[in-house]
Amino acid sequence: MKFLLEQEEVNSDKPDKDCRTPFSHATSGGHEGVVKILLGREEVNPNKPDLWGRTPFSCAANCGHEGVVKILLGREEVNTDKSDNRGRTPPCMPLGLDTKEW
């Protein structure tokens, strides 16, 4: 996987039929190593919403992937407050995170 992701000709930000990118899949799956690699790719938009308006950050938070959430919280370019198409914002309580970390 790492070899494939490190190839320049691979489009790391190409969405699938649900507008989910490889980065979105990595965050919702809790794949911290892949998340770190993809964050290093210039073409990857860490805030690109899927068909339902969910961002990679909200997917990670909703799935309870604390490690990924903490990685994303450490990045200035990641929008942690963007709401989805229903107006819902990422939860912090299910992860047990202190709201001061947000």
Image: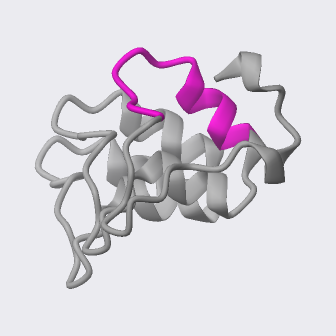
Query: Would you say residue 30 is visible in this rendering?
Result: no
Determine the residue positioned at 35% across, 27% down.
Answer: 40
Is residue 45 or residue 86 the one in the foreground?
86
Q: In this view, does 66 lie above or below 75?
A: below
Q: Residue furthest bottom?
A: 17
Is residue 59 or residue 16 the one in the foreground?
59
Q: In this view, does 87 lie above or below 66?
A: below
Residue 53 x %, y %: 30, 63
Q: In this view, does 95 lie to the left or right of 59?
A: right
Q: What stretch is highlighted in magenta?
A: 67-80
Query: Would you say residue 98 is visible in this rendering?
Result: yes
Determine the residue positioned at 46% across, 65% down.
Answer: 25
Q: In this view, does 1 lie to the left or right of 4?
A: right
Occupied quadrant, residue 15:
bottom left
The C terminus: image quadrant: top right
Q: In this view, does 1 lie to the left or right of 52?
A: right
Residue 22 x %, y %: 35, 61
Residue 50 x %, y %: 29, 66
Is residue 94 or residue 10 the one in the foreground?
94
Determine the residue positioned at 17% across, 62% down.
Answer: 14
Q: Is residue 68 above or below residue 51?
A: above
79 within the magenta span? yes
Residue 87 x %, y %: 39, 59
